[in-house]
Amino acid sequence: MSESQFIIKPRWLVTMDEGPHVREQHAILVDAGKIKAIVPKSDIPDWAVDWPVVDCSQHVVMPGLINLHTHSSMSLLKGYADDYALMPWLNEHIWPAEKRWVSPAFVQDGSLLACAEMLAGGITTFNDMYFFPQATIEAAKRTGIRAHIGLTIMEFPSNYAATASEYIRLGTEVRDQYKSESSISFSFAPHAPYTVSDQTFTDVVTLAEQLNLGIHTHLHETQAEIAQSQEQFGVRPLQRLQALGVIGPSTVLAHGVHLEKYEQETLATLGAHIAHCPSSNLKLASGIAPVASALRSGINIGLGTDGAASNNRLDLWQEMRTAALLAKVSAQQAEAVPAYQALQMATINGATALGLQAQIGSISVGKQADLIAVRLDELNSLPCFDPISHLVYVASREQVTHTWVNGQLRYQRLPDGQPQFAGIETEALRSIALQWQLKMQQPAD
């Protein structure tokens, strides 16, 4: 018997795979980071009877959540500039702060805080977009979370790079350095249509095809973005990116708040994916995305938190509930996004968008053991008639008690309620946050 072999015995199992939505009294057998078997608790095979057992008798065990769009290291800017619309928020607050503070140390420390927050909330994979991606990778490796790293590209100089070609060169070098890491994957991340030129988009498309990487960008987040594109290019951003070859089955488009019906049909036909970020869209007053209509069009939609500077939480439980409720009210249909579909958006849909659906996103034999246990015997969760409904409409991230990535326990909530992370002490995380707060509160020279 190896320490990498163990059995999880939950009350309920939600696999997000084909078959019953909920299985009761089943066990998951994990071996060497993968799901070895799923069997009734009474039918543990002879070869596994001596494996250690994780008792989750009051829990749902389900696939880890997938954060399809975030800027993890912006956790250090949480609450830094609130209650502004997107462009004033960026131009007058966030970009000046980034110019002053962003560095490899800033990105690594901010990403450590984000990785811990995400693991404690049951997020096992995140799709990132930020400067100094190697620093984010090192934070992900330390905490053990799975990371899909967007290699940021824009025309404007930053502390990371001066030109679009330098962004591309540095990003490609990072990809080459870490491409053998099993829990790290990559895409090119041209920031947005309003920060990237036609030539750079064309170069990115060519490189993405050569290196077999996807593309991750912001699109149709605000009406102002669309108006600017129409004035500058004579077309809406989606039409421009489609003409440049950006839109396809390996493209993740963050936000998609303002999409006409014909544009939704275009995205569905081309196989592109949307990272829906409802809380960020609400907080920045960007709008309410037409999720019910987009789903009916056949678009694969996952959920993202956006960065903690604009949300201000990396909390996919909040995003699931908000996404389901907003879809209902905007479509004026109570059945628009039912609970199970919201769970799909937070799990298997996100995996599909990243091209990782064969590895993660559902509990299936042979997949990686990216799993979470969610306790449903808390007072706020009783009584429980339907665990899937409870996961979306009742449960909170504080009810996540275990988070496994690749079969390794990366977070657990101790009996006294305190968090425990693999790879870093909670007090060290608090110290990192407070040190940066003190530094950033100092007046500029």
Image: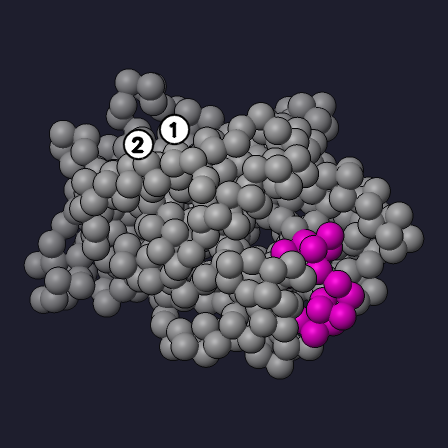
As drawn, is 101 to the left or to the right of 365?
Answer: right
Which x, y percent locates residue 78?
A: 44, 36
Q: Specify start and end residues of the magenta stretch as a single range.
A: 189-204
> Which residue: 24% across, 57% down?
408
> Which residue: 40% across, 54% down?
107
**Residue that mark 2 sits on:** 399
Amino acid at dot 1: Ala
Q: Are marks 2 and 1 in contact (CB under 8 Å)?
A: yes
Q: Residues within 10 Å of mark 1 (few under 14, many from 20)?
A: many
Quarter holding the C terminus?
A: top left
**Residue that mark 1 sits on:** 395
Look at the image and tell me whether residue 81 can be seen: yes
- Please tell me in which quadrant of the rendered image residue 20 appears: top left
How many numbered discs sit on the rendered protein?
2
> Which residue: 12% across, 58% down?
51
- Please tell me in which quadrant of the rendered image residue 345 appears: top right
